[in-house]
Amino acid sequence: MFKKLLLTAALLLSVMLTNSFADVDTWHTANQATVGWDAPTTFQNGDPIPQDAVLEYDLYTATLADHSDAVKVGHSTSLTGVLSFTAEGNYIVGVSAVRVVSGSPIGSSDIAWSNVPEYCLNGATFGISYYLVPDLPDNIYKQ
């Protein structure tokens, strides 16, 4: 019985550590955030991407550090995107590059996440925190 309890506790601790945001350097509090990125310069096989290639980008958010709950939240044809948050929480931002040929998407990269240093500017990881704001007080009076 004790071994089973100890094993369960170890498993729960492992899941909690895997899904923590301990690896995020900076949290930005906002209900809307603009993020930017650099375009990839090579295909996954290492060949250079031609200058006339059309790339677009899909935007994602996740609330778990392992990104297992990733949700596509937007699309951009430029090197920036705007994310709007409606539910309280801590969010990690993700971007994937989509190759477009003759107006149709033909394939996309893996998602680059804002909590992975090698995908972030100068290795500085970040996340976005969103909190609901209280409504105005009313019935103000002088005491």
Image (cartoon, rainbow, N blue to C red):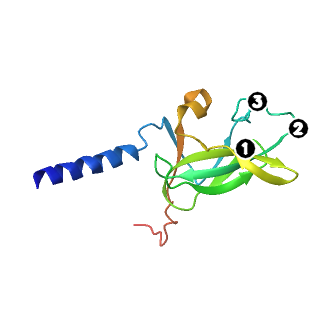
Q: Please say if 136 is above or below 68.
A: below
The Cα–Cα distance between marks 3 and 2, rounded to whole angstroms, is 14 Å
Give the residue at x 48% y 67%: 137
Task: Specify the amino acid type for callout 3.
Answer: Asp
Percent coordinates x, y for residue 17 in the rendering? 35, 43
Quarter of the rendering occupied by the N terminus? bottom left
Q: Which of 136 and 123 is in front in this view?
A: 123
Residue that lies at the very extreme toward the front in this rendered image: 45
The number of callouts visible is: 3
Neighbour tally class for label 1: few under 14, some 14-19, many 20 plus, Cα within 10 Å: some
Q: Mark 2 points at which residue?
A: 52
Neighbour tally class for label 3: few under 14, some 14-19, many 20 plus, Cα within 10 Å: few
Quarter of the rendering occupied by the C terminus? bottom left
Q: Do the residues labelled 1 and 3 touch (CB within 8 Å)?
A: no
Q: Mark 1 points at which residue?
A: 80
Determine which of the numbered discs, if any, sits on residue 47 in the image.
3
Task: Specify the amino acid type for callout 2.
Answer: Asp
